[in-house]
Amino acid sequence: MTGLLTILILLGITIAIWQMVKIFDLAQANKDTSQIANDKDNSVHGYLMLAFLGFIYLITIISFALWGDLPLVSNSASEHGPEIDRLMIISMVVIFIVQTITQFLLHYFAFKYKGEKGRKALFYADNDKLEFIWTIIPVITLAGLIMYGLFTWNDIMNIDEEEDPIVIELYAQQFNWKARYAGQDNVLGKANVRLINLDNANILGLDESDPNAQDDIITTELHLPVGKPVLFKMRSQDVLHSAYMPHFRAQMNCVPGMITQFAFTPTVTTEEMRLNPEIYEKVRNINKIRNENSKKLQAKGEEPLDRYEFDYLLLCNKICGKSHYNMQMKIIVETEEEYNAWLQEQKLFKNSLVQN
Amino acid sequence: MSAHVDTHTHDDDHGHHHKETFVTKYIFSQDHKMIAKQYLITGLIMGIIGILMSLLMRMQIAWPEKPNVIFEALLGKWAPGGVMDADIYLALVTIHGTIMVFFVLTAGLSGTFSNLLIPLQIGARDMASGFLNMISYWLFFLSSVIMVISLFVEAGPAAAGWTIYPPLSALPLAQGGSGAGMTLWLVSMAIFIASSLLGSLNYIVTVLNLRTKGMSMTRLPLTIWAFFITAVIGVVSFPVLLSAALLLIMDRSFGTSFFLSDIFIQGEVLHYQGGSPVLYEHLFWFLGHPEVYIVLLPALGITSEVIATNARKPIFGYRAMVASIIAIAFLSTIVWGHHMFISGMNPFLGSVFTFTTLLIAIPSAVKAFNYITTLWKGNLQLNPAMLFSIGLVSTFITGGLTGIILGDSALDINVHDTYFVVAHFHLVMGISALYGLFAGVYHWFPKMFGRMLNKNLGYIHFWVTAVCAYGVFFPMHFIGMAGLPRRYYTNSNFPLFDDTQNVQVLITIFALVAGLVQLVFLYNFIHSMFYGKKAEQNPWRSNTLEWTTPVEHMHGNWPGDIPHVHRWAYDYSKPGHDEDFVPQHIPLKDGEEELQH
């Protein structure tokens, strides 16, 4: 019933707008009926073009003022992060300059050369020199950005095995993440989804006879020691997922049937990050928002929201089904001692199996 | 290659012999002008559905917890108590994308204006094959109907994103929408592709063979160049999507393993082995990226024509414009990998695709600069079509520039699949192409319906839309750079993103206003179709041949001989002429020189 009512109301609103437009339409029927822009239209809309230029600049300024602290271009928590951030800032500056100039020219010309009866436009069809200039400028600018980008990309994607990285598997399934540590030998045991045996809790399909698998450790939180290179091997058991770790400027898809990889070195522990002034401020702001929302909830007799504390996160960033929006895992970066102590407490794979 | 087609033999037929019934005139018409109108109206109806879906999504994102009576009314069992179901949210994401990209901006835009303008602007009586043209439209219609029907299946419409990556799209166990809804999606798209191919072949053949005397390739209006090259891209890339769709159908229904391997889902191991989802991604994006230009080039072609006409000035750098259309078309087929930097493909390929992708910025920049120079020292007639064209250049620049970030593999790592991407492609292809569609409708409405659209309603439509388009998509870059993933049903499970929520609300408000103002356009369109002011033959004082045809439509377009062409399409404000335009069929004066192209 409410459904029908709502549809009727929406229909009513549509008709109301329709009628308003019609009235507007009829009201001006007696005036100029040519429906082709005359000098007055050109003048009005020429000025509006100028105003629109102002609007574009204004929305740019407002966006930077209000939301300029949102973008992840500082406080990266990985070794390669500042590289990406620097390239990002350089690209943004280039874009900003080009955007400001070209939008100015476009809208200013639209204003300046608004039509007048009797004036004739300049017959100006070609200028090879001019066109050469604005072909070559983008070529040079882009060549610079491409070079910089490619060096950064190669740097990030070429994994240096000699650094002896800690090998960790990220395992994705609808709709949660698991991490598998390689254990003492730093070699992940063989695994395939065909070996999954829920009866004895072999949930990731490890090869139970593989000696390398015995000391593997499966967890639901991702702990990383600070300052150590980590090599992630990604696996998915069902559909595509994407392991997105925004604070580390890291992302790689998890693809059923193949193993993908990504490596980085975390540089800032969770504790240190919480004390970072910018992050501290961000968290304070978020808690302010949450407090206000909590008040509204409590007024309705519902549970208030939890206090937010900063944590690194691993998010799923490839559409993967119904609960895609809630597929996450906490990441904790800590000192090596803390990391080792935590690892000690975890169950080895061979001990985690349920004996029938 | 000059095309002389002797059409005199047909001349006597036209306008006399055809006894037309309602069915042959309005339904199974083989007349390109009627088919264009059919495309436009079908495209607009699909557009209404697509835009409505985006508004539902925006409301869900802005106010995720609140029960919403509109959801309850429109989504029925998918919004029990007015709370939207997470599955239907993904379905909305999927169908909105599919409808807007394919049904509105491919068929609705290119289908409409290629059909309307190719014969009229090159001086042909009709398309090379009117029959194929009719089939092409009806296949499009059929695929639209199937797509709409898919919204009503029990387990929900396709919900794997418009890219329908397997395994999600292949396994009904993974998602309700991957059942009958996905089957219908695939069938609809297969038919759509057939329609698109028939249309494109027709456009190519017509442009190559049916140009009137004197209409050399270098005298073609830029609209025709854009439609022609678009058709070529379509013929090259759409079949690849068809193959991907067919292989996916095989995987879904016949147990093959093209895209699937090693899958354990809902407690059971599936038999698939040896396939790769990455292969699907390659096949999909081999169409998917050129598709961006299939959508965009016709809009740019329309813009070229509208800007030159209304600036009363030749388009600046005609040769460079043609060269950049061709360059964009070529490059568009070798950049698809930039959608897959982090798909698990070899990082070296990522480097190659970064290189080719940033190259495509060069012809795009040339086009933008040439538009701006065309305005310089013009005598701008700011008609609604002109405003939409200038708006297109503006959003094309704003949206295109952020492509420099997304095309750079190193930067893509951290903004891939975030709202930054959503903002980028909506501005550069969504809004730009929509503006192209609107510019085309405002400019050629007199040609299509013999009546004028109301200009003041057009002005309101443009300005409100223009402000809202920036209001929606400009702030969106910022929440994207904050790391907020797209396609999340709600962000309330991530306190980390709580500070982006007020931006989401603002965006939704702009989106709702933008949606409402389209009603003004719809009113204008429908009302003017019947009651608009009668159009003169050449209301915009334009040079191209379509304005030499009578206002009343007739088979064969011209009552007498087809005019011959003596000059290019852009002799606006040419010195030595009294008028500020010299149509293409006017012979050169004694001693007048044609520009060398």
Image (cartoon, grey):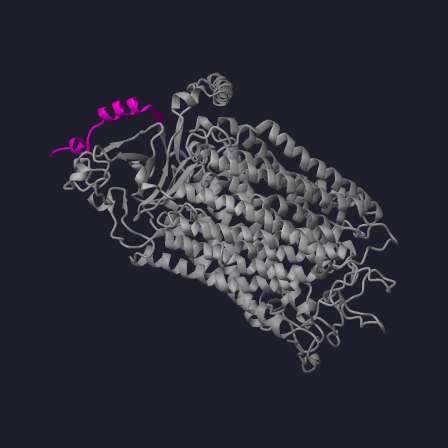
Snapshot quadrant of residue A132: bottom right
- Up/down of B22 relative to A339, above or below: below
Of the pair B199 and B503, the residue shown nearer to us: B503
Of the pair B460 and B372, the residue shown nearer to us: B372
Q: Is residue A123 visible?
A: yes
Of the pair B81 and A307, the residue shown nearer to us: A307
The residue most toward the left is: A356
Q: Residue at x 52, y 35 (%)?
A: A86
Q: Residue at x 59, y 51 (%)?
A: A139
Question: What span is colored magenta in the figure?
Answer: A332-356
Q: Quadrant of the N terminus of chain B?
A: bottom right
Q: Quadrant of the C terminus of chain B?
A: bottom right
Snapshot quadrant of residue B231: bottom right
Judge whether residue A351 is colored magenta: yes
- Up/down of B346 relative to A309, above or below: below
The residue most toward the bottom is: B9
Q: Position of residue B125 (x, y in %)?
A: 67, 73
Q: Is residue B437 visible?
A: no
Q: Residue at x 26, y 24 (%)?
A: A342
- Up/down of B186 relative to B405, above or below: below
Judge whether residue B434 is colored magenta: no
Of the pair B95 and A69, the residue shown nearer to us: A69
Q: Position of residue B106 (x, y in %)?
A: 56, 56
Q: Position of residue B22 (x, y in %)?
A: 62, 67
Q: Position of residue B576 (x, y in %)?
A: 87, 64
Give the side of residue B182 with respect to residue B266, left or right. right
Give the side of residue B328 with respect to residue B592, left or right. left
- How many numbered marks does the figure carry? 0
